[in-house]
Image (cartoon, coloured by chain):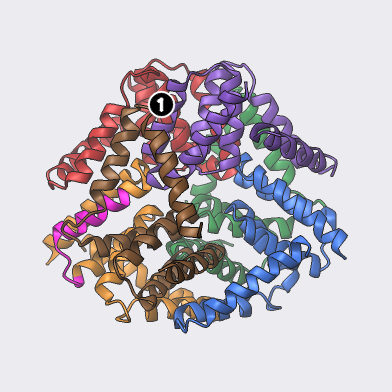
Chain colours: A blue, B green, C orange, D brown, E red, F purple
Amino acid sequence: MNSEKTFNAYREKMNKKILSSNNKVIKRIFNLDTNTFSDGILPLRTKEMLGLACSMVLRCDDCIKYHLGKCRDEGLTNDEVYEIFAIASLIGGTIVIPHLRKAVEYWDELQTAV
Amino acid sequence: MNSEKTFNAYREKMNKKILSSNNKVIKRIFNLDTNTFSDGILPLRTKEMLGLACSMVLRCDDCIKYHLGKCRDEGLTNDEVYEIFAIASLIGGTIVIPHLRKAVEYWDELQTAV
Amino acid sequence: MNSEKTFNAYREKMNKKILSSNNKVIKRIFNLDTNTFSDGILPLRTKEMLGLACSMVLRCDDCIKYHLGKCRDEGLTNDEVYEIFAIASLIGGTIVIPHLRKAVEYWDELQTAV
Amino acid sequence: MNSEKTFNAYREKMNKKILSSNNKVIKRIFNLDTNTFSDGILPLRTKEMLGLACSMVLRCDDCIKYHLGKCRDEGLTNDEVYEIFAIASLIGGTIVIPHLRKAVEYWDELQTAV
Amino acid sequence: MNSEKTFNAYREKMNKKILSSNNKVIKRIFNLDTNTFSDGILPLRTKEMLGLACSMVLRCDDCIKYHLGKCRDEGLTNDEVYEIFAIASLIGGTIVIPHLRKAVEYWDELQTAV
Amino acid sequence: MNSEKTFNAYREKMNKKILSSNNKVIKRIFNLDTNTFSDGILPLRTKEMLGLACSMVLRCDDCIKYHLGKCRDEGLTNDEVYEIFAIASLIGGTIVIPHLRKAVEYWDELQTAV
């Protein structure tokens, strides 16, 4: 299984488990997340860019991977993704760079996976 | 002096002082910041949205103010700004809300200042 | 107006403004917050302790103030609050101490305000 | 070796190494940690809940695992642990969710390990 | 009263109040802090540089002020302090810059206060 | 391949990939990083100590590893490195300890690798 499939399979397995717990607050957070990341006043494409940039400055590798997959789905070009990488690295500082390395690696895998 | 003018005046006074120090690394960071936040592959309008969202999840009031001013300059609508507020509050959690309050207050002042 | 009243008045004024914006995601986050901080499997008293500790390690002065007010309402003793301060300072490190100073100042004001 | 044993074995091996260094400050931090997480004004059970919530909003997977083990020892129910998960996810935002997935996975392993 | 005096007076007043609470964990954290920031294997001068840099990347204005005062006491030159500012701004990113502005303002006040 | 070689090989492979993207902002950040971490007003030795301490309080394992390698190159003694570990653990709190464990493990590998 390639990186994207492994990542998504774990994510889906655990989401299912979490939602089966019947904790209403967690269910509503998950539901709100689904509703937020859909076309609204801002198109989904823009929202995914925001999600990617926020994930980078907060240095969450899994969140970065998730939004990279969505950015690919939304048709972001390589140059656009790198510009988001650049803005996040500038705002978040060099502490972001180890996460940038993993982001670039995963982004490349997403390209070759098609 | 209104909020925006007070904010900008302090910012400019201190930036001038910082740059007069002749520390090359700091100068280059400031310079890089200016170059990054200009039209590139992504238009400045999109970059300012990214800057605003990142500032909110990192919970920096002054950074939020700065990017709100720029978002106003780039013609973002009230609904667009609130959608960025929403995404940042969802990703960053309720810990972001006190910063959201100040952001909304400043955003309103920016409107009436025109 | 004392500290608590000033704090609450600003908080309520801005919450009202934020909710009048009709952004559904933000409304739902506020609503979820209200629902979460009520008696559930865990009593509200315990939840407010969790809210206070999380606010301290995340170093959000306004969040700390808010949960301190609620901890007072829930009848936490001085020793209990200080034990939460201690745990948060240990986990979060000495970087938490400036926030501890403000927390102690506000906690004292809450006592004398009664 | 199951997850819990692997986790604890590494933790103990490294703690031993760290303490053998004879750095007094580190020794005292470790000692203070041991003393703090014992029954005091607040029972250990409550303190472990605080430790778990703080670890989640600070997004430290190892700290989450550690406190989950202790919460199990203190007899927290599944519903109680999920309520702490919910509060931490609300306060810390969706950036906490990847850590929630790992937390749920480890919590399940702790149950079956008995 | 000048900035430094105001800052130190509040700090001392609140520290006294905190320590009068008789919470042993907090007392030991304060005590440990005092012991750590004294000459050891590393001279205090180096430790204060580390304290300043850490305070900047963690973006704590009061911690920055405290360590700037100590750096002044330890005889750090203007150029040395700016080099620490530069390293912290690079590692921590442009989100550190609003804190850099306040740091520079306070550092200047410390010079003229002599 | 030992830990240090594996770490450096991945780091260099990805840096090369990132720089081949021709994103000017990222290139300049990398370039600025190289220039900053060289002898200046402060010797490189001191700068690497600052880099290590900042990496620890920001809890970035890869950044810690990188600066540990450089601290070894700059001839820091075991006691000096542990004193930096102590300061970072005090400032950053016990949430730093899981990163301290990995840091100690890697530091030991760096010694035996010689």
Q: Main secondary structure of the magenta part?
A: helix
The reply to whether residue D49 is visible in this rendering is: no
Q: Where is C76 relative to F73, above or below?
A: below
Region in magenta: C73-89
The residue lying at 56 percent from left, 16 percent from top is: F43
Asked if the magenta segment contains residue D55, the reply would be no
Observer-nearest of E100 and A85: A85
In the shown orientation, is residue F114 left or right of residue F100? right
Location of residue D54 (image quadrant): bottom left
Furthest residue in direction front, as rendered: D1
Q: How many marks?
A: 1
Observer-nearest of A1 and B66: A1
Instruction: Point out residue B39 in the picture as x, y percentages from the top left corner.
Output: 79, 52
Observer-nearest of F57 and B102: F57
Instruction: Point out residue F79 in the picture as x, y percentages from the top left corner.
Output: 42, 21
Q: Which residue is mark 1?
A: F83
In the shown orientation, is residue B46 left or right of residue A79? left
The reply to whether residue B15 is visible in this rendering is: yes
Observer-nearest of B25 and A22: A22
User: Tag 1: residue type?
Assistant: Glu
Q: Where is D81 relative to E102, above or below?
A: below
What is the secondary structure assignment of the residue under circle 1? helix
Q: Quadrant of the C terminus of chain D?
A: bottom left
Asked if the magenta segment contains residue C79, the reply would be yes
Chain containing the residue with disc 1: F
The residue lying at 75 percent from left, 60 percent from top is: A3
Q: Residues within 10 Å of mark 1 (few under 14, many from 20)?
A: many
Instruction: Point out residue A83 in the picture as x, y percentages from the top left corner.
Output: 77, 51
